[in-house]
């Protein structure tokens, strides 16, 4: 029980730090909103009111090492689904460029864009997503894979994470 509280506290600290350094928080899907919120409870609203923030991953530009992307993972114990938002950061923040977010149950094929599990555009300035694991697939005891890309030099894939 203690480890759950520690993980939750660390997650909240990570989100708070991300907000203080300019994490874009989308108001709606589409990636060109500059809406920024200062409360963690509002962050869970990105994917829906039943979703809680469970993971925050940063990625640097492969050329400059500057942090240019954040991937934030959410989970709903009600819907039994995961959600992903990929946000621009650093010099990529506010710049229209190719941005992609994709999520899948581990072992499944990557979803085709556009779809529920994938969002991409050549002109997003702030974020891609939110995207969700498939409806009707109980993710409470499954791992997920996520993929994020901002521009041509900032990308990250994570496999077998957040296993129920």
Image (cartoon, rainbow, N blue to C red):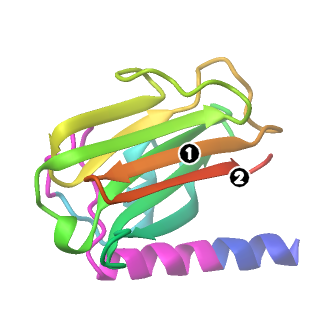
Q: Are marks 1 and 2 in contact (CB under 8 Å)?
A: yes
Distance Cα–Cα, label 1 vs label 2:
8 Å
For mark 2, does the 10 Å Cα neighbourhood hold few (<14), some (14 to 19), or many (20 or more) residues? some
Q: Is residue 82 above or below residue 113?
A: below
In front here: 42 or 92? 92
Secondary structure, mark 1, is: strand
Number of marks present in the image shown: 2
Lower sequence index among marks 1 and 2: 1
Query: Residue most toward the top?
Result: 136
Q: Residue at x 28, y 45 (%)?
A: 99
36 in relation to 125, above or below: below
Q: Position of residue 124 (x, y in %)?
A: 17, 45
Magenta segment includes 93: no
**Quadrant location of residue 101?**
top left
> What residue sits right under mark 1 in the picture?
146
On whether residue 25 falls in the magenta region, the answer is: yes
Give the residues in magenta: 10-34
Q: Nearer the viewer, residue 23 or 28?
A: 23
Residue drawn at (68%, 48%) of the image: 159
Q: Residue 155: x, y in percent?
A: 42, 55
Q: Which residue is mark 2?
A: 161
Q: Quadrant of the N terminus?
A: bottom right
Query: Looking at the image, which residue is at 27% across and 65% down?
Result: 37
Tell me where residue 136 appears, x and y as whole percent.
Answer: 66, 17
Query: Would residue 3 appear left or right of 126 to someone viewing this image?
Result: right
- Look at 63% across and 43% down and name the residue there: 145
């Amino acid at each position: 029980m203690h480890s759950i509280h520690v993980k939750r506290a660390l997650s909240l600290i990570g989100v708070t730090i991300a907000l203080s350094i300019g994490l874009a928080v989308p108001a709606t899907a589409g990636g060109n909103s500059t809406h920024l919120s200062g409360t963690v409870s509002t962050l869970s609203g990105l994917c829906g009111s039943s979703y809680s923030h469970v993971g925050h991953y940063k990625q640097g530009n492969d050329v400059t090492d500057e942090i240019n992307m954040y991937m934030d993972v959410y989970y709903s114990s009600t819907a039994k689904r995961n959600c992903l938002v990929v946000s621009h950061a650093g010099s990529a923040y506010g710049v229209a460029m190719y941005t992609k977010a994709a999520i899948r149950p581990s072992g499944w094929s990557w979803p085709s864009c556009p779809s529920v599990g994938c969002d991409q555009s050549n002109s997003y300035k702030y974020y891609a997503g939110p995207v969700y694991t498939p409806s009707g697939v109980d993710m409470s005891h499954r791992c997920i894979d996520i993929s994020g890309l901002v521009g041509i030099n900032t990308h990250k894939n994570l496999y077998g994470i957040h296993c129920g």
